[in-house]
Image (spheres, rainbow, N blue to C red):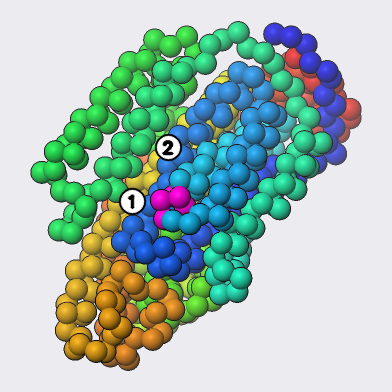
Amino acid sequence: MDDEPEVKLNRQTVYVIFGALVGAMFLSSLDQSVVSTALPTIVGDLGAVAHEGWIVTAYLLTIAVAMPVYGKVGDLYGRRWPFLLAITIFVIGSTGSALSGSFAELVTWRALQGLGAGGLMISSQAIIADIVSARERGKFMGPMGAIFGIAAVAGPLLGGWFTEGPGWRWVFWLNVPIGIIALTVAWFALKLPSQRSQRPFDVWGTLLLVLFTSGVVLITSWTSIVPGGHYDWSSPWLLGLSAFTVAAFVLFIWVETRAAEPLVPLHLFRDRVFSVSVSIAFVLGITMFAALSFLPTFLQMARGLDPTDSGLYMLPMTIGLMITAIGSGLLITKTGKYRIYPIVGMAVTTAGIAWLTQLKGDMSIVLFGAMIFVLGFGLGLVMQTIVIAVQNAVAPTAVGTATSTNNFLREMGAAIGTSLFGAMFTSQLASKLAPVFQSIPAGQLPHGFSADDLTPSTMKHLPAEVHSEVVSAYAQAMAPTFLYLVPIAAVGFILTLFLRDRRLSTEAGLVARGELSADEIHDGGDVAAST
């Protein structure tokens, strides 16, 4: 590989880089939550209430597809340029989303946003592994987990404020100045070694992974466990798609066993810590994002809250997540042990999801806050801890691939979980609302008004009796849906019991590759990192 100019890394430089990474992490995390409170209004305005989940699913799907690519490219060629490219793509996708004139356009631009966001998430976590040892990484990963929590509450609040004020399109315009600032800071501050690898990129593996991932999400989006979905299992379209998806997966495995430089090296799964951790990530994605995507909608439609207030009422979950994400990170750095945190975290998460099955339209908002605080408290113990475990389980030259595999499975779980949860919820909601609208005497509703036209604003204009029945329908449809997530979360808890503590490395990734001195980076002296 060719020599690159020296890269000076001292303690101050590490913290400057960390600041840039936190900004990027906030940007990608914010866009997973900022849309949630605006979602009912967006789909109502664009006439696509029945397809609400696609706005979330498109974003999560492309994040999942992009992650392994960014991880591998970073391992092969360095992380600076992929990171800068990811920010640029994200800003372009945000601009297109803001200018969208139809639901199809919005979903397309949201998909492009996801391609950028996937790079921001993976590159941020992999760059930290390059410059900070696994033993010290907890105090950096903890704040990154907290950033997710902050974005989880700041997003709904900002989304609600924009929806009620200048309009929902500003939910996407918000990303543009933040993205430009992040790009500028990263351009000047993010000075990392790069290389020109002679190893070939796994093009066929990438293509097959895209096909498989897309097929899985389409299947989960097009089906429903009760009548009323777009397709059922007798549909030749669905059967054909299922066969195609299975074939893509089989071919992907076959290609990866023969590729000179596989996109996802299958030998990584032979390591117990790695395989258990990424399995937990998959389960976490199913349970976490299903709850985060639909609870704000429940607050608006069933509780009658405006978008801003519904975001504010999600604050207890963020507080719980921040407490445990930062606290567990500091304790991991102090003790060098990480196993206990995912075990406790998944147990608490399972209990929190089980508690959410008791949701009611007229329940105390304090009780609701307690429910989601417990959920956040559990999630904070798991999210970043398993990333540390995964990165510590592989060689430094594979840290990007390992990190992206972990996050890919989490986001894949998120796409599947959101699609399945959305399909189950909307199908049950449709069955609950149908008799409500059929029983309304002619003239009480505007001509042509139906359940597809329901938004937080139109809810306020419904006759009192109809409004009460619609609220009841939302609660009756939402609460039982969480019941399907409980056994999935319980499986995640069982998996954590098989996780083992492994000594955390005291060397950063670049140190292990001989690119800088361990003593110098830990002492804060100037460090020359060259490739």
Checking the image for residue 33, the label placed there is none
The span shown in magenta is: 103-107
Q: Quadrant of the C terminus?
A: top right
Q: Which residue is mark 1?
A: 419
Compared to residue 213, the image places residue 444 above or below, namely below
Q: Quadrant of the N terminus?
A: top right
Displayed quadrant of residue 206: top left
Q: Which residue is mark 2?
A: 409
Residue placed most toward the observer, 23 or 368? 23
Instruction: Determine if the magenta segment contains residue 106.
Output: yes
Compared to residue 312, the image places residue 514 above or below, namely above
Along the horizontal axis of the image, is 389 left or right of 209?
right
Along the horizontal axis of the image, is 444 left or right of 347?
left
Identify the mark nearer the N-term, 2 or 1. 2
Q: Amino acid at mark 2?
A: Leu
Q: Find numbered disc 1 in the image and state the secondary structure of the residue it sits on.
A: helix
Q: Find numbered disc 2 in the image and state the secondary structure of the residue it sits on.
A: helix
How far across and how far down the image is residue 459, in percent?
A: 38, 81
For the point 13% across and 43% down, the residue is 235
Q: Is residue 56 visible?
A: no
How far across and how far down the image is residue 337, in percent?
A: 58, 39
Looking at this view, name the residue that lies furthest to the left.
234
Q: CA distance from mark 2 to mark 1?
A: 15 Å
